[in-house]
Amino acid sequence: MAQLIFTQQLARFFAVPQVDSTALVLRAALEQAFAGQPRLRSYVLDEQGHLRANVVIFVDGQRTRERQLLDDALRADSKVYILQALSGG
């Protein structure tokens, strides 16, 4: 199963799950994570359901480029890291 790993930046706000998913695409796997922790959705997606500007997702070491459809393919052994991009100075 693909593993979704939410980095600890989000843990400041609530319990962050690690989700095992049989989904074939990223969006479906994210929806499974949101079902278990509904508040997580607003930290990852904006009001239109697009990836927030301050969130970055890596699938198997490759940064996702598509921020609206989130249609990256997942394999059974995929590792997906979801993190908030750091900014400031």
Image (cartoon, rainbow, N blue to C red):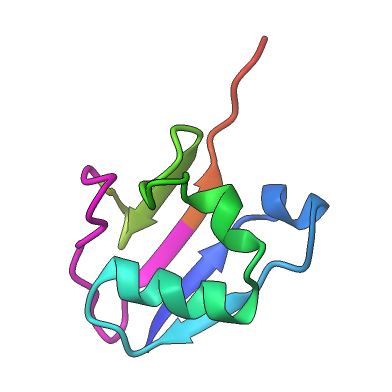
Describe residue 83's horizontal placement relative to residue 78 as left or right. Answer: right
Residue at image x 36%, y 47%?
50
Describe residue 58's horizontal placement relative to residue 42 as left or right. Answer: left
| Span shown in magenta | 65-81
Q: Main secondary structure of the magenta part?
A: loop
On screen, 39 above or below 12? below
Relative image position of residue 35 (x, y in whole percent) = 55, 80
Q: Is residue 61 part of the magenta span, yes or no?
A: no
Relative image position of residue 82 (x, y in whole percent) = 49, 55
Q: Quadrant of residue 25?
A: bottom left
Q: Quadrant of residue 36?
A: bottom right
On screen, 49 above or below 71? above
Describe residue 75's horizontal placement relative to residue 47 as left or right. Answer: left
Residue extending furthest toward the top: 89
Residue at image x 67%, y 62%?
39
Residue at image x 47%, y 85%?
20
Q: Quadrant of residue 27?
A: bottom left
On screen, 28 above or below 59? below
Q: Is residue 74 part of the magenta span, yes or no?
A: yes
